[in-house]
Image (cartoon, rainbow, N blue to C red):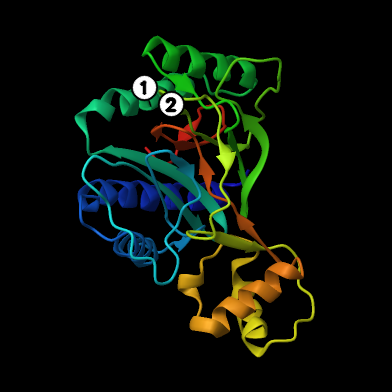
Amino acid sequence: MNQNVIDNYIKAGKIASQVREEARKIVMPGVPLIEIAETLEKKIRAGGGVPAWPINISINEIAAHYSPSKGDDSKVKVGDLVKVDIGVAVEGYIADTSVSIALDKNDEKMVEAAEKALEEALKMVKIGADVADIATRIEETITKAGFKPIVNLTGHGLGQYIVHKDPKIPNHKGDFHYRLKEGEVIAIEPFATRGQNFITESESKEGLTYSVVEEKAVRLPEARKILQKLRERQGMPFTDRWLDASGVGLRLAIKELSDRGIIRPYFILKGDSKISQAEHTVVVLDKPVIITR
């Protein structure tokens, strides 16, 4: 990995960490989710980065992938457990971080459990480390705190314009051995809960983000305009909030693009109880660099 690439990752990580701290300040009862998302996305751009995906604001039992759509009137409520997942790209090199904000004191220990598991996992990152050992440490830390790790959500690798790739970094012990290699970039993200230790995909059509799978000819003019606008994202996820179309025209365009397999949604991931999350991105070098700290 050359120094220019490392520098881009470090810049992306610095922006992401600043945005994460801004999220801590602005997430409070009564604030619309769209206001939070757009404020943080604006801060990413002002810092010299690009949102690698729309800001995700996943509340309570929603574990991941909720980003307010155009017209979403949802607001943060008293007692919510709010997870803000942030991705920043600089020249396509992505930093991924998240924060859980407990608006009920009863959830603070669960937030601390995910954060502690992350810190313990980060201590183990080095060239040659086995992800099975990291996963075991994550599970042991969360269970010792009295909670459960989500077993079908994992950390993951990152690449240029690629938000998820191998290796996976599981959150529970198991027989999945992989040794980290020099130059890999990984996001470690423990999830903790009191409820069931797995999540399922929601059938909700609200709060979805999308990515382009492949380009094909389309019939609707609005669909063509959307595809043209999205080329610059090179496959990174997007939201309808970023598109100029609105109303029926937007809905029909999204439907055509979806039906033809041109775009795919990131389905909302849910459990049966509140879920906390913590996350940092690490560049695996002789001396690993936690770029989002």
Query: Which quadrant holds the N terminus?
Result: top right
The residue lying at 37 percent from left, 37 percent from top is 293
- Look at 50% across and 16% down and name the residue there: 139
Residue 33 lies, in percent from the top left, at: 33, 59
Instruction: Tell me: 293 left or right of 151.
Output: left
Mark 2 or mark 1: which is in front? 2
Real-space CA distance between mark 2 and mark 1, rounded to the nearest whole angstrom? 7 Å
Badge 2: residue crowd in 10 Å (few <14, some 14–19, many ≥20): many
Quarter of the view holding residue 71:
bottom left
Q: Is residue 245 left or right of residue 120?
A: right
The x, y position of residue 15, in whole percent, is 37, 53
Q: Amino acid at mark 1?
A: Ala
Q: Secondary structure at mark 1?
A: helix
Is residue 246 something one can see in this rendering? no
* Between discs 2 and 1, the one toward the N terminus: 1
Q: Quick one: 63 or 156, which is closer to the camera?
A: 63
Q: Which residue is mark 2?
A: 192
For disc 1, the marked residue is 113
